[in-house]
């Protein structure tokens, strides 16, 4: 996969994308991430890329020319790409694991990070193919939001994680929240790891994990349960927890 990011703050990306899974994925050529400074495409001698909004009002708006030219530059570098151009914006579709899985199937993504009051509407109308929000709140720029998307997508790429199974059991991958995790020591300050996890009985462990995931989802995100295909055993277990008022 190749990811091109357009930003006014390229330096913001080096540490978060240089470490751990994304850092390793770049070193292992699983993903190539190119960060482009929007100012490089400015025609202004001081590198100005923003201007006051038409109609008045507070703040500045990123001008269309440098973004159009940056995207055209990327199109020339990646000529056969499917042209997915993502705008990070609080007005977009709320990002989800499902969207991350869908994006992870693309060979090339271009991500535009806004700043100030955002980008000129003509960028959204003509260049952008999808708009993504990381949640119903406003942050000052699209950089952190783009990094959230990149992290979520890259860890899904084949070979990015040491153990591919961890993606499968992650929260949201099966529309369940993940079951509780424990590690050594088996007892800490009187708190014991459940016996079943130390039993070596894989069938019982699998059963316990499914039930715990179900319980956790019921307790924290009951809205998700309607989307899950439940087995008869799941339904029985859910009835039990409801009756016990857990
Ligand atoms: N005035 C804009 C609005 O109300 O839609 C918000 C501008 S915000 C201060 C500046 C930039 O931060 C946006 O253009 C966008 O790129 C990014 N941003 C802010 N909140 C975001 C969110 N929840 N998800 C994705 N990007 C966000």
Image (cartoon, rainbow, N blue to C red):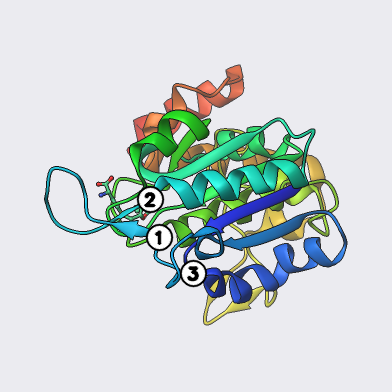
Q: Residues within 10 Å of mark 3 (few under 14, many from 20)?
A: some
Q: Position of residue 167 (x, y in %)?
A: 71, 47
Q: Position of residue 48 (x, y in %)?
A: 39, 65
Q: Which residue is mark 3?
A: 9
State the residue at coordinates (68%, 50%): 3
Q: Compute the Cα span from label 1 to label 2.
A: 6 Å
Asked if the residue at tag 2 contacts the one at tag 1, i.e. Cβ–Cβ closer than 8 Å, the answer is yes
Q: Position of residue 118 (x, y in %)?
A: 33, 50
State the residue at coordinates (48%, 59%): 43
Instruction: Mark 1 vs mark 3: give the one in front.
Output: 1
Q: Which residue is mark 1?
A: 49
State the residue at coordinates (75%, 34%): 81
Q: Secondary structure at mark 1?
A: loop
Q: Compute the Cα span from label 1 to label 3.
A: 12 Å
Residue 63's disc is 2
Q: Earlier in the sequence, mark 2 or mark 3?
A: 3
Q: Secondary structure at mark 3?
A: loop
State the residue at coordinates (57%, 38%): 85
Q: Earlier in the sequence, mark 1 or mark 2?
A: 1
Q: Relative to 149, say whether 241 is above or below.
A: above
Q: Relative to 173, say whether 232 is above or below.
A: above
Q: Is mark 2 within 8 Å of ligand 1?
A: no
Q: Is mark 3 within 8 Å of ligand 1?
A: no
Does residue 52 appear left or right of residue 166 in this picture? left
Q: Compute the Cα span from label 2 to label 3.
A: 16 Å
Quadrant of the snapshot with the C terminus: top left
Residue 114's disc is none
């Amino acid at each position: 996969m190749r990811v091109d990011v357009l930003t006014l703050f390229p330096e913001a990306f080096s540490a978060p994308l240089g470490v751990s899974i994304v850092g390793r994925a770049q070193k292992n050529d699983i993903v190539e991430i190119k960060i482009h400074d929007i100012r490089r495409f400015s025609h202004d001698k001081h590198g100005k890329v923003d201007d006051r909004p038409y109609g008045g009002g507070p703040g500045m708006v990123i001008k269309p020319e440098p973004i159009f030219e940056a995207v055209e530059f990327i199109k020339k570098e990646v000529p056969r790409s499917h042209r997915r151009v993502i705008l990070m914006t609080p007005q977009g579709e709320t990002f989800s694991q499902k969207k991350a899985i869908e994006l992870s199937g693309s060979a090339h993504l271009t991500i535009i990070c806004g700043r100030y009051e955002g980008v000129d509407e003509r960028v959204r109308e003509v260049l952008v193919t999808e708009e993504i929000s990381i949640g119903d709140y406003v942050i000052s720029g699209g950089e952190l939001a783009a990094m959230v998307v990149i992290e979520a997508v890259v860890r899904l790429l084949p070979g990015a994680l040491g153990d591919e199974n961890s993606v499968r059991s992650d929260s949201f991958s099966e529309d369940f929240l993940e079951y509780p995790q424990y590690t050594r020591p088996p007892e800490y300050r009187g708190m014991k790891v459940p016996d079943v996890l130390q039993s070596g009985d894989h069938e019982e462990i699998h059963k316990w994990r499914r039930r715990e995931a179900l319980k956790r989802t019921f307790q924290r995100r009951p809205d998700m349960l309607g989307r899950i295909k439940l087995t008869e055993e799941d339904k029985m277990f859910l009835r039990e927890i409801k009756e016990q008022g857990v």
